[in-house]
């Protein structure tokens, strides 16, 4: 539940932490560990379970993997593989490492747009409730996710982002950002140019202006 203060793909904290566990699920190592916990007989069943959940909470049955991106992620993900095998050596991952990595690479390659991200943000803004009023996750679980988004969601720029924007947000190195205005709205933005932290330059700039103009900061 703690920010690392390091880049999203850093392995250093895994080695220096006394627990040898990822600090939070918003960084690569944490996401790989989480991928290993998904129930299923093999990587296909595990990923399909995750994809079905993503389609449900983003209210879009057409979501799917961009397989060109997936192949690229899998072929070049050597640092992620090293994290996976380190986590396996420390007992954090109990199952098959390659299965966990395959689920991770595929979830990194699910193709979404800004509307999908905004719908996800709205789902969290409504504490885990779909637009039709159906409750999917508990309010406590939704609050945990939003809190982690504030403290860890923008990698090692999370503190500065909290001051400038003040919204629970999660970025991805694809250039997307999902932000949550609790009880009011979800926001999805996309800008492919990234800053040194791996966050969308245009996305962060827009969210700062938007939050200030409308007084959206939760602080």
Image: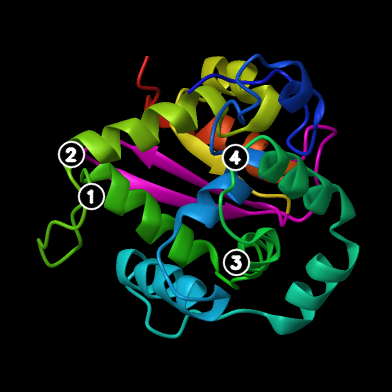
Ranked by sequence position, the earlier of labels 4 and 2 is: 4
The residue positioned 80% from the left and 32% from the top of the image is: 11
Q: Position of residue 115 (x, y in %)?
A: 45, 65
Give the foreground label among 4 and 2: 4
Q: Which residues are magenta?
A: 174-198
Q: Secondary structure at mark 4?
A: helix
Q: Is residue 193 visible?
A: no
The reply to whether the magenta stretch includes residue 19 is no
Compared across the picture, whether 93 is left or right of 86 comes to: left
Mark identifier at residue 128 = 1
Q: Residues within 10 Å of mark 3 (few under 14, many from 20)?
A: many
Q: Are marks 3 and 4 in contact (CB under 8 Å)?
A: no
Q: Find disc 3 in the rendering and name its residue.
A: 103
Instruction: Name the foreground residue: 88 vs 204.
Output: 88
Separation of residues labelled 3 and 1 (CA atoms) = 23 Å
Q: Find disc 4 in the rendering and name its residue.
A: 30
Q: Work out which quarter of the rendered image holds the C terminus and state it.
A: top left
Ranked by sequence position, the earlier of labels 4 and 1 is: 4
Q: Is residue 180 visible?
A: yes
């Amino acid at each position: 539940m703690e920010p690392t203060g390091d880049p999203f793909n850093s392995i250093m904290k895994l080695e220096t932490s006394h627990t040898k566990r990822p600090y939070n699920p918003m960084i690569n190592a944490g996401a790989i560990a989480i991928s290993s916990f998904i129930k299923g007989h093999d990587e296909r069943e595990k990923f399909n379970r995750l994809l079905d959940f993503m389609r449900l909470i983003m209210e879009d049955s057409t979501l799917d993997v961009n397989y060109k991106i997936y192949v690229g992620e899998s072929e070049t993900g050597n640092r992620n593989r090293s994290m996976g095998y380190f986590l396996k050596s420390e007992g954090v991952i109990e199952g098959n490492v390659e299965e966990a990595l395959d689920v991770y690479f595929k979830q990194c390659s699910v193709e979404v747009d800004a509307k999908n991200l905004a719908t996800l943000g709205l789902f969290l803004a409504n504490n885990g409730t779909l637009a039709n009023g159906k409750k999917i996750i508990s309010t406590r679980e939704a609050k945990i996710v939003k809190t982690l988004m504030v403290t860890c969601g923008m990698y090692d720029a999370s503190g500065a982002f909290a001051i400038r924007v003040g919204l629970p947000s999660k970025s991805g190195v694809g250039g997307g950002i999902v932000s949550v205005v609790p009880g009011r709205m979800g926001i999805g933005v996309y800008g492919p140019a990234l800053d040194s932290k791996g966050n969308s330059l245009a996305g962060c700039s827009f969210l700062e202006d938007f939050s200030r103009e409308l007084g959206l900061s939760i602080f």
